Amino acid sequence: MAKSTEELMELIDQIPNEPAKPGEFILPELMAIAVAHEVRDDDIVFAGTGLPMVGIMTANFMNAPHATLIYKSGICDGKTMHVPMSVCDQRAANMCSTLGGLVDTFGYYLQQGYVTLGFLGGAAIDKYGGVNVTSIGDYYKPAHRFTGSGGNSDIGTMAKRTAFIILQEKRRFLERNDYTTTPGWWCWDFKPNGKKEWKPKKEVWKGTPFADCGPTSVVTNMGVYRFDKNGIIYLETHHPGVTVEQVKENCGFDLNVSMVKGETPHPTYRELFVLREFVDPELIFLPQKVEYPAAIKSIIG
Amino acid sequence: MPLREKTKKAEILTLEEAVKKYMRNDIIVAYSGFTGFNRNPVAFAWETVRQGFKNLHVLDRHGSICTWLLNAVGAIKIYETDWMGWGEMAGKLDVNLERGYKAGKIILEDYSHGAMAMRFLAGAIGAPFIPYFAPLGSDLYNMEYDALGKAGLRGKNPKIPKKKFIQMEEPFYGEGNVVLLPAARPDLAVIHVAQAGDKGTARWRGVGTIDKEIAFACEKVVVIAEEIIPEAEMRKTPESNQIPYFTVDCIVEQPWGAFPSSVPFYYDYDAPFMRGMDAASRNEADLKKWLDEWVFGPKNWEDFLVKLGAKKLLDLKADMVTGYSVRMMRGKKPAPRMKMPLSVARSGY
């Protein structure tokens, strides 16, 4: 007889909070938990759909239980029981503080300066953390056309810190994007005469309340990245089973690897337990459920 | 913007009548809800496709089941929006839209969510434009990427602003540069709600997205309600109402009219059905078959629901505590029964 969620809840503290071994977790789990580690307990987080949402829900269940989760359709501090499939899912609105709409979330919360952490996806990223979710190739005759900005460009420029989750390939990690949807630490300065100049975001946004806001970390399928004082991305950790060389090979520019700290920390058994049993037990975002090692199984029963 | 001469008096019509009267070719239309998941006025868009309206200008902030249906028959000519996935489970561009766009049949105008929310807010409060900071330095504010301007469509239709945006120095507090965005002023809003009073006062539960703003920004407003109830009932808890009757032109009662999107506290979204739509759109023969079966086949929306079957409707029926259903298979495993969110159980608020 399978245990009820209440019974499983009682077990959480008995599950060791020790790093799992290679083979005991899968990549999406590692990424979701790496995302969760970016969230602080006093953050107001504005997240996009998919793995970012799985990550912040995990954080809310583990390391940041008091973090406030904003969902762009109008939800303030949703306390989810079931993982939402979209930011407008009623599941995300469960036990929330207030419900409003996009004017609330993008105006009253975001442009008002309340949001401390944005969590977003992207199709391609440049070395300054600028993200493209619009098109590859010519804008009017694109080789690939994506969904367009959504809230990516609003959140990515006006949240104090922003973290991105992106699939890493050579053609997605670029010196410069074909189309900059969400400016990173360098972006266009559009002049009234129609000319444009590539400049630091701090200069383009100078005088606005948001000049110091921007990307602070990137989680990919290969590693975790941060930005140096010049706003240029560097590798901080590489995931287990991935070498620094492989990371460099999957990067379209000369990546700074001089500050690598080592391997991305493995998720702990307790984190994996929470992710699998409480965040996505329906297997909506996670592709499969991995078997627990014998020692953990014996606790769960 | 023209001033109104007198109070609107909402008429109650059937779905067929409302589409026939309020839709037309070349109209600028906005739909309620958010993405494919929440309060999409699907029945209205479905009937629009059946009645064969074309060359629509959708001015909206999301890809939805409505835009998916319209794109499936090539009914959209201009799509002015900020996010064009139609189901975030796919997270990708609607395939029909991509096909139409690459064939040069659709004009896409890109904004961001926040910018579009601000444009509708300006439209709602009667302001011609609104300042907004984000996203300065983005190609969204690159003058070369003004698709409506490039197509020569600005300055002709009075509902299409003369410029996509204007960037200027913030003149009051000296806060750097700011972007002025033109108000959104569509011809028609189609808004799916939970309940409408018979005079037109309307309400929903769950997220509001930008539906109140849309109701005020558009010239005509059609409300599709799960149920029409006596106006007196709506007045017992007026703080729960969002749309005042004097913005509403027409009310349609259409139970399950937002399927396969959700109406919180009425029914949940149908993820497998949406995945089926996405799969069908991957090739033209499958799409035609799907449209024949689900759009042109049924005699009317009731017939469509009968075709879905009682089992499906029972599984989707929302529970009155959470407003959603845990009986529907969304992923690969059934949803667990839960009484309390883990974060609240362990750490309170």
Image (cartoon, helix red, strand yellow):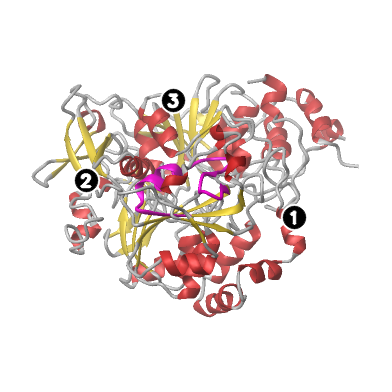
Q: Residues within 10 Å of mark 3 (few under 14, many from 20)?
A: many
- How far across and how far down the image is residue B188, in percent? 38, 57
Residue type indicated by callout 2? Phe
Between disc 3 and disc 1, the foreground one is 1
Q: Which of A294 and B57 is in front in this view?
A: B57
Q: Nearer the viewer, residue B29 or B75?
A: B29
Magenta stretch: includes residue B200: yes
Q: Quadrant of the N terminus of chain A?
A: top right
* Dot 1 or dot 2, earlier in sequence: 2
Q: Give the range drawn in magenta.
A: B196-222
Q: Residue B203 carries which label?
A: none
Question: Element type at marker 2?
Answer: loop
> Against B121, is A65 above or below?
above
Q: How far apart are marks 2 and 3 (CA)?
A: 28 Å
Q: Name the residue under label 3.
A: A116
Q: Mark 1 points at which residue?
A: B315
Question: Element type at marker 3?
Answer: loop
* Left or right for A48, reference B303: left
Q: Distance between the residues labelled 1 and 2?
A: 46 Å
> Against A157, is B57 above or below?
below
